[in-house]
Amino acid sequence: MPDAGPIPSQRLASFVAGALESRGVPLADARTVADLMVEADIQGYGTHGVFRLRQYLARLAGGGCNPAPRIGVDRETVATALIDGDNGLGHLAMAAARDLAIEKARAVGIGWVGVRRGNHAGPLALYVRPQAEAGLLGMAAAVGSANHLPPWGGSDLLLGTNPIAFSAPVEGPDPFVFDMATTVAAMGKIKTLAQQGLLMPEGWMIGRDGQPLTDPARRGDGFLLPIGGAKGYGLSVAIGLLAGLLNGAAFGSDVVDFTTDTTSETNTGQFVAALDPAAFGLGDDFAEAAARVFAEFRASPPLPGHDPVRLPGDGRTARAEARRRDGLMLNPALRRDLNVLAGDCGIDPPFPGEGG
Amino acid sequence: MPDAGPIPSQRLASFVAGALESRGVPLADARTVADLMVEADIQGYGTHGVFRLRQYLARLAGGGCNPAPRIGVDRETVATALIDGDNGLGHLAMAAARDLAIEKARAVGIGWVGVRRGNHAGPLALYVRPQAEAGLLGMAAAVGSANHLPPWGGSDLLLGTNPIAFSAPVEGPDPFVFDMATTVAAMGKIKTLAQQGLLMPEGWMIGRDGQPLTDPARRGDGFLLPIGGAKGYGLSVAIGLLAGLLNGAAFGSDVVDFTTDTTSETNTGQFVAALDPAAFGLGDDFAEAAARVFAEFRASPPLPGHDPVRLPGDGRTARAEARRRDGLMLNPALRRDLNVLAGDCGIDPPFPGEGG
């Protein structure tokens, strides 16, 4: 009988690490990346977790990504650093940036660490939630790993979804963890609608004719739209400058589409920051004060037709604990794909007895 | 004959300083604030410049704002500081925060300075553009000076427009200066429309009945809408945490509506940051690289019906220089209002021979 139930997170991580190792990634790095990829699924960021293994393996095989990078600190002050990811798997440089930012924040109140020559690193939440769990505030941003939209009013693909994330400690089960793309919709959602034969709402994409585009099958003929029109555009440019250009990383036409190009170095740029409340007004009382304000928010009566008010991050801790305990339910297409990848890598399939 | 032409910026600043002095603000502080208020008009932020004088005078007269604050640094590291604005005019604490952030960025790559017990300080652009002019990147945010929207899906006014601003040096006439509210519209713009008797477009506000609200005079009956729906909500909360709570400043129900309350301390929270490219990848080449990417953006052919692509900040330098040279054209309602305020303060009217 095929095992169609949940897969224990540690078994999934071992499989991912084995697949990465088969492509030349040293064991310790393979484990670090695999654990972060599985953690993304555990935290509920399924589009940015193990689902991305196929892309990462293709770029390792194609030479676009360095399997055995030496992550180094290029420049450093007590409060800032620039990490060179040596074109390795993006998680390695970003995990190092996160840890260094936390260390610096504890020493001098803030740590701001830029990354150049990185790669796609999964959801930014991986690089801000630990700050909140350590009693710090976190911030991170990235230049998107492919350009999906033009500058506002233009027609050349020069901007990515350029996500930004924030975190903060809150007394209670859930820290504040907010991770958003600066576009209205993510390309992944649009591909899913196309598979299901459904239309997009107006406002997700615009055609090259300047008119709303609602057929997801025609996504290649149009552009993603930034949130708030020109405001989301400005925010996206600001992220491109802070996460990309400042670090000597790609922004604009230099951005390599990592979903189609398996051979070129992307020079992905990101930053991770941490702030220590002890250096500011509320000090150790921050988490308590945040819980008080958030309680006011949750107590606000919902508008007709709306669910009760939530804060970004609400409920994630309990759902993550359940997945850690009970295993991860991956969808059938992903299970098949991981079995196929196991065959490609010459390792045991993660879902023996199922197709692939 | 009434003088209906432009008013020289220095004459306007002298009038504003005189009005503030008449309410007990010491001369040096009055000049600092007046210069920044007029600079806001020069830079094209008319809703956040001299237009705000009436509010500031009312809060000084009502005791809600301290005319003679002692701006102090409460906590400090090499990279961070917390400034106590002593409930003075907000420009004083924010100008101090900006200067300190720049100083720290030059020393250790980044400066992040929080403000507590501040007040409305005009447009954030005043506190990020100087970084760009000095070759640094700038960032600033504020908890809005009144709550105009509920948490997403809720019905209690617990969030303000919580603006955020970014700047960066760019080779050429205009630095990157981007200053946005996290709402679709800023309350200042809505007040200007009300003053001019014009309607708002749909999508700026909704009424408590959930219907579009377009009469700016009825703004008290509804809510501002965040950009990108739940995304703008999350961003606004993140700003509330970083600019407000972290500094021990107001956020949530603690926020005092400074437009209607002239007697209570607001404890407005803000932060200003600066980053020195020399501490990161591109160093001194940052401005040149930004100009190269921005040139790509501007060269992107416009979509049908769109103007040529612009970057936030484009054209502001030339327009500011023209206003500095030729004087400021204030609208008739504002000219009359300033004349009325002159009468209230017992000083010469800025527009002699006109009504007021």
Image (spheres, coloured by chain):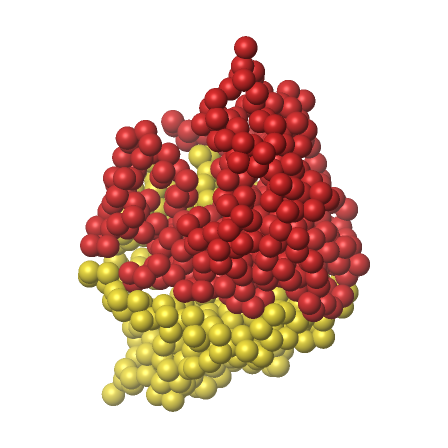
Chain colours: A red, B yellow
Q: Residue at x 69, y 58 (%)?
A: A70
How many numbered discs, if any?
A: 0
Q: Quadrant of residue B40?
A: bottom left
- Vertically, is A318 above or below A66? above
* Residue A91: percent from left, percent from top: 62, 48
Left or right side of B27 for B311: left
* Residue A99: percent from left, percent from top: 72, 51
Residue found at the far front of this picture: A346
Q: Residue at x 33, y 71 (%)?
A: B298
Residue B118, can we see it?
A: no
Q: Residue at x 56, y 32 (%)?
A: A342
Q: Quadrant of the N terminus of chain B?
A: bottom left
Nearest the eye: B180 or B333 = B180
* Residue A62: percent from left, percent from top: 51, 51
* Residue A205: percent from left, percent from top: 30, 47
Q: Residue at x 51, y 26 (%)?
A: A335
- Vertically, is A67 above or below B3? above
Left or right side of B135 for B4: left
Left or right side of A343 for A148: left
Residue A336, can we see it?
A: yes
Q: Quadrant of the C terminus of chain B?
A: bottom left
- Vertically, is A309 above or below B199? above
Q: Quadrant of residue B65?
A: bottom right
Residue found at the far top of this picture: A1
